[in-house]
Amino acid sequence: MIYLLHPMILFGWIGLSWLIAYLGKNKRFGFFGTFLISVAFSPLIGFIILLASDDRVPPARRVE
């Protein structure tokens, strides 16, 4: 049997996932990775991953 989600639930799920991904753009997984985790599992799991992940360290710049 096929279960269809109400469009507002679907838009809310994707919207929350996008918000979490935006907050995670400077984290270890980046925007795309955090977005995929949030969409695939749930925005709650994505938020937990966001809180647990480290900040991305920029590469050291050479000074000449």
Image (cartoon, rainbow, N blue to C red):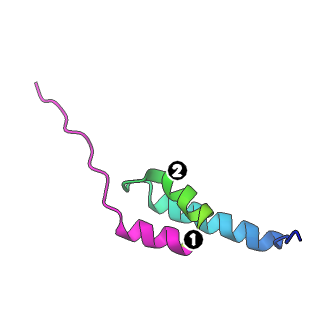
Tell me the amino acid under the disc marked 2.
Answer: Phe
Tell me the amino acid under the disc marked 1.
Answer: Pro
Q: Is residue 32 magenta?
A: no
Place of residue 27 in the rendered image (x, y in percent of width and height, measured from the top left): 37, 56
Residue shown at the point (57%, 71%) measured from the top left: 43
Label 2: which secondary element: helix
Residue shown at the point (65%, 65%) measured from the top left: 15
Instruction: Say whether marks 1 and 2 touch (CB < 8 Å).
Output: no
Residue shown at the point (54%, 75%) measured from the top left: 44
Query: In this view, which residue lies farthest toward the right?
Result: 1
Label 1: which secondary element: helix
Q: Where does the N terminus fall, quadrant-wise?
A: bottom right
Check disc 1 and report the residue beneath it.
Answer: 43
How many marks can you see?
A: 2
Place of residue 47 in the rendered image (x, y in percent of width and height, measured from the top left): 48, 71
Disc 1/disc 2 C-alpha distance (Å)? 14 Å
- Residue 58, placed above or below residue 39: above
* Nearer-the-camera pick, 45 or 18: 45
* Nearer-the-camera pick, 15 or 36: 36
Check disc 2 and report the residue beneath it.
Answer: 32
- Residue 16, numbered circle: none
Q: Is residue 49 magenta?
A: yes
Q: Examine the image and state in which quarter residue 8 appears.
A: bottom right
Judged left or right of residue 10, residue 35 is left
Circle 1 Cα neighbour tier, 10 Å, few/some/many (<14 / 14–19 / ≥20): many
Residue shown at the point (24%, 39%) measured from the top left: 59
Q: Examine the image and state in which quarter residue 16 appears.
A: bottom right
Q: Where does the C terminus fall, quadrant-wise?
A: top left
* 1 or 2: tag closer to the N-terminus: 2
Magenta-drawn segment: 44-64
Circle 2 Cα neighbour tier, 10 Å, few/some/many (<14 / 14–19 / ≥20): some
* Nearer-the-camera pick, 47 or 25: 47
